[in-house]
Image (tube, rainbow, N blue to C red):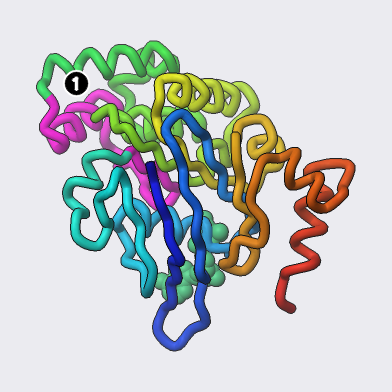
Amino acid sequence: MIQVSHVTKRYQHSVSVVDDVSFSVREGQIFGLLGPNGAGKTTIMQMISTLLTPSSGDITIYGLNTKTDAREIRKMIGFLTSEVKLDPFSTPDKLFRFFGDLYQIDRSVAEQRKEESFERFGIEPFAKKKIIELSTGMKQKISIAISLIHNPPVIIFDEPTNGLDILTAHQVTNYLRELRADGHIVLLSTHIFSVAQDLCDELSILVDGRIVAQGTVSSLMELTGAATFENAFFDLYTRYHKE
Ligand SMILES: Nc1ncnc2c1ncn2[C@@H]1O[C@H](COP(=O)(O)OP(=O)(O)O)[C@@H](O)[C@H]1O
Ligand SMILES: [Mg+2]
């Protein structure tokens, strides 16, 4: 279980970019953070992944606190974000070897995981090519496979289908459904309505760093009385966005 309780993040001399945010995510659930650019999604995910420290509030994962148990928590998390770039002159093969060693995974286990994900995502033909020569979709699939090399119970994916063609996006969303069915905890951020609607069991709507509504797609539509989920979002956004 991920538990985020009254978390605020303030950079020096600035207003809160994340403001009193609380939510929890269970095993076997895909939880979404939906909001426009600048809403605070990446900041929240970086705090959960222990890369940023909250100004106030607490985050626990299986009872471990991000402030005191960062080492243990990092091992339990698969984190994907566009902020991290693969070394352009490395190859998928070398990257797998590197991250397998980094996580101290037995080489034979790492090799097996690599084969599974190379097959799933069609990476095999590109295994020895330089990253710089690969398409955006292929790079994203490699990033996803690497982020899960240590088979973490908690998956935190920041905008996982951004910039992907529809086929690759479909492969990624199907994979997330499989991981949910296997009992993983999945937290993702998105600003794409169809991703939120098709994939997420529950959502937080973020506007200016605050959660303005939370629930299932249908409960959010009921709450606003909107006919479509997109309209429900825009109703909430108009109501809560500070000029
Ligand atoms: N290092 C930083 N210093 C000051 N402000 C920052 C810093 N990083 C992000 N921000 C601000 O925090 C807000 C939330 O950003 P972010 O979490 O990236 O939003 P999102 O992922 O939803 O687009 C934005 O207004 C952004 O400009
Ligand atoms: Mg972001």
Question: Camera-side residue: 142 or 110?
Answer: 110
- Where residue 229 sits: x, y (%)? 78, 43
Could you tell me which quadrant the C terminus lies in? bottom right
Question: Label 1: which residue?
Answer: 110
Q: What is the quadrant of residue 10 in the picture?
A: bottom left
Q: Is residue 150 left or right of residue 121?
A: left
Across and down, in percent, residue 120 comes to 42, 14
Range covered by the magenta-colored residues:
78-105
* Rendered image quadrant of residue 161: top right
- What amino acid does circle 1 point to? Ala
Q: Which residue lies at the image location 87% right of the left edge and 47% below the top edge?
A: 226
Q: At 47% from the left edge and 56% from the top edge, which residue is drawn?
A: 42
On screen, residue 233 versus residue 16, left or right, reads right
Relative horizontal placement of residue 231, taking residue 205 as reference (left or right): right
Quadrant containing the N terminus in the rendered view? top left
Image: 84 above or below 206: above
